[in-house]
Structures are given as structure tokens and as C-alpha cells.
Image (cartoon, rainbow, N blue to C red):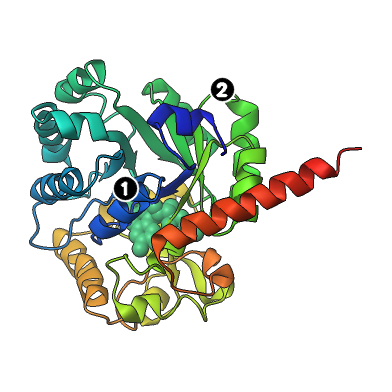
Amino acid sequence: MIETDITKMFGLKYPIFSAPMGPFFTRDLALAVSEAGGLGVLSNVNIVGTDPVKEHKASMEYMIEHTDKPFGLNILTSRNNPGVRQMVRNLPKIVMGNVRMRDQCKYWLTSAGSSKFLPQSKYFQELRENSEVKHFHVAPAVWLAKKCLDSNVDGIVVTGTEGGGHQSFERVTTLVLLQQMMKAFPDLPKIACGGFATGESLVAALSLGAGAIAMGSRFIASKQSEFHENYKGLIPPGKPQDTGLFTGSFGPIRLYRNEYAESHPAPSTKEEMLAYEQSITPEQQVKDLGSYDRVYDGDVKTGAVLLGQSIGVIDSIEDANDIIEGIMKQAEVVIRRNAAMLK
Ligand SMILES: Cc1cc2nc3c(=O)[nH]c(=O)nc-3n(C[C@H](O)[C@H](O)[C@H](O)COP(=O)(O)O)c2cc1C
């Protein structure tokens, strides 16, 4: 049994979260992770032609129908994200109106945009005052974590450059970022993210002041994840260097190297990134989002394949429950081994 500030905050058996992985569905994965004792997160599904409010509502209904455990949801607060205004306005209203959703959907994670956007919603303020709902924001840099504090977040997700998907142009590793965050904000609850896949890495995160880890790539390679078999099939043979930083619709992004990735080179400064964001036309955005649709159908050559360097330590596609139990067992062994070093 490992108890941390985060396991206590959310009433969890284990300090393990699934990371949000929009625009892909992660309904079954979130369910499996929550049922196994971690906390499963519903991704912001914004594939062309979908209504993100409806998708989140349907996913929450699915969750409360199948589990009584806590879970979370992600909202990408980038101004380029279709439906973001409707989500921050309508989702808190929907959750307020359903006791089970209010009690179970406790973890509201915003990312890839402003941390202020959600707490500015009067409906979210009302929900937060009348429930145990917590607001976390993804902070891939210390200056962003400072902004999160100004937004009065309950905690941050500390995501380093080795992680799959959305990234900071600053490219700081999770190892260094966690130390920076610990120095700057020792009391702020933290979830470590980016590069985690083993029990040893969980212990490292806890040692660096995090109260839990969140994993994306490790859970894609699970039986319950809704990803196409071609996507999963890249992971066990994959090496860290098969991924790289490229350009996504919301800034830098870590992708598996393929035709799509190589045609989207990464910006190297914040200015370049902002200029790129402003230059994206609605037509280009639709085209880029279409590359996720292709991946959904198994095209891992010309579609955008988001994966982290952790693929280099993942050698099996397993049941999510076995992944979590295996990590916890290994973490205990490592903690005992470490304690035995003390003489
Ligand atoms: C397929 C995929 C999709 C992602 N989509 C999102 C997203 O919608 N929102 C977000 O905050 N992060 C997103 N990320 C980043 C993850 O939440 C997380 O930071 C990352 O997976 C951690 O690194 P790991 O893959 O090494 O575990 C995505 C990552 C992947 C692999």
C-alpha cells in the first residue's frame, strides 16, 4: 500500500493515472484503469464531425454505468480547439445535474492552453464549491506552473519532453522538470508524466516529490485501449529514438517518426510556435485533424502517431489491470531495496 497526497485527494488504491489521449477515445481504457484502482481519464475527443460536449457526456454516462470508482476528464483549452467554450460552460452544468457524475468525475484536467479558462466559468466555480472536484493543469515548464498557481489550481501535471503528444518548446526532461517544480512549489500536489512505464519509474517520481504518475504510451499498449492494432503494434518493438518532436495543431508534439511527422518539423522558440499557431487556417486545422482520423483507421504511415520515448521500455501488450498490479508490485520491491541501503 502506497499512500500519497494524490491517492488521498482522490480516494485511490494506487497512485497511477491514465493520461488523456485526445482526439482518441479512451473510454474503455479509463474504465479499466479506474476499476483497477488507479484513476482513468476521458480524453477530449475532437475528431472532425464530433461534438466534444456530447462525447464527454456520453463517456461520463458510460463510466457511471460501469463503475463506482473516481475518474477524470480532459479539456484542451487551446483557442484552436473546436468546442472549448461550450465545454467549459456546459460540462460543469451537466455534471452538477447528475449526483453520480458529480461524485465520481473528480479530476478535471485542462491542458494545451490557458489554465484560467475553466475556473473562469461560473458553472465550474459552482461545481467546485459544491463537490470534491479538483482542477489540475498540465505544466510542461516552470513559468507555466506559476500561471497555474495564479489560476488557483489544486495541482499540476508535470510533463517532460520525453512524453508522447503535446509538449513544451523548451524540451526539459521529466527528471529535471520535477526537481525544478519541487524547488519552486514544494507544497503543490504534482502528478509526474512523460516517460513512465515501470515500477522503478513510479518510485523515482515519488522520490522527486510527485504523488502519482500518469502514463499514456504504456496504456496504449493495453488490451483495453481503443487504439488500432497497428498503433499498438509499433510499441513493443519501438525504441525511444523512433519518436521525435514535431509540430501539432496546439504547438510542439512528440510523434512516432513517419511520413506525417517528418513533414511537420518542430518550432524551436515560443515566438515561432505562436507565429505558427496564428498562421493555421481553419482549412489546415481540419486537414491536420483528419490525420488523426486516418490513424484511427490504422494508417500509421501518413497519420499522426503520438507516442513517447517510454515505448523503448514497453515490451508487451497487457491487460490494464496487470500493468497496474505489475508496476505496484515492482515499486514495492524497489522501495524495500532502497530502504535496505540505509545503514
Ligand atoms: C496518443 C496520445 C494522445 C495525446 N493527447 C493528449 C490530449 O488530448 N491532451 C493532453 O493533455 N495530453 C495528450 N497527450 C499527452 C499525454 O497526456 C501524456 O502527457 C503523455 O502520453 C505522457 O507520456 P508517455 O506517453 O510517455 O506516458 C497525448 C499523448 C498520446 C500518446
Spot occupied by residue 237 in the image (x, y as percentages of width and height): 52, 81
- Horizontally, residue 315 falls left or right of residue 183, namely left
How many numbered discs?
A: 2
- The three-letter code of the residue at mark 2 reads Asp
Task: Name the secondary structure under disc 2.
Answer: loop
Q: Nearer the viewer, mark 1 or mark 2?
A: 1
Q: Quadrant of ligand 1?
A: bottom left
- The three-letter code of the residue at mark 1 reads Val
Spot occupied by residue 103 in the image (x, y as percentages of width and height): 23, 29
To which residue does mark 1 refer? Answer: 41
Spot occupied by residue 8 in the image (x, y as percentages of width and height): 46, 28
Distance Cα–Cα, label 1 vs label 2: 24 Å
- Horizontally, residue 62 falls left or right of residue 142, namely left
Extreme residue in the right direction: 343
Disc marking residue 176: none
Mark 2, Cα crowd under 10 Å, few <14 / some 14-19 / many 20+, is few
Q: What's the residue at 48%, 43% (across, down)?
A: 14
Asked which quadrant contains residue 125, the reply is top left
To which residue does mark 2 refer? Answer: 187
**Closest to the observer: 1 or 255?**
1
Extreme residue in the top direction: 129
Asked whether mark 1 lies closer than 8 Å to ligand 1, one says yes
Q: Is residue 96 above or below residue 23?
A: above
Q: Earlier in the sequence, mark 1 or mark 2?
A: 1
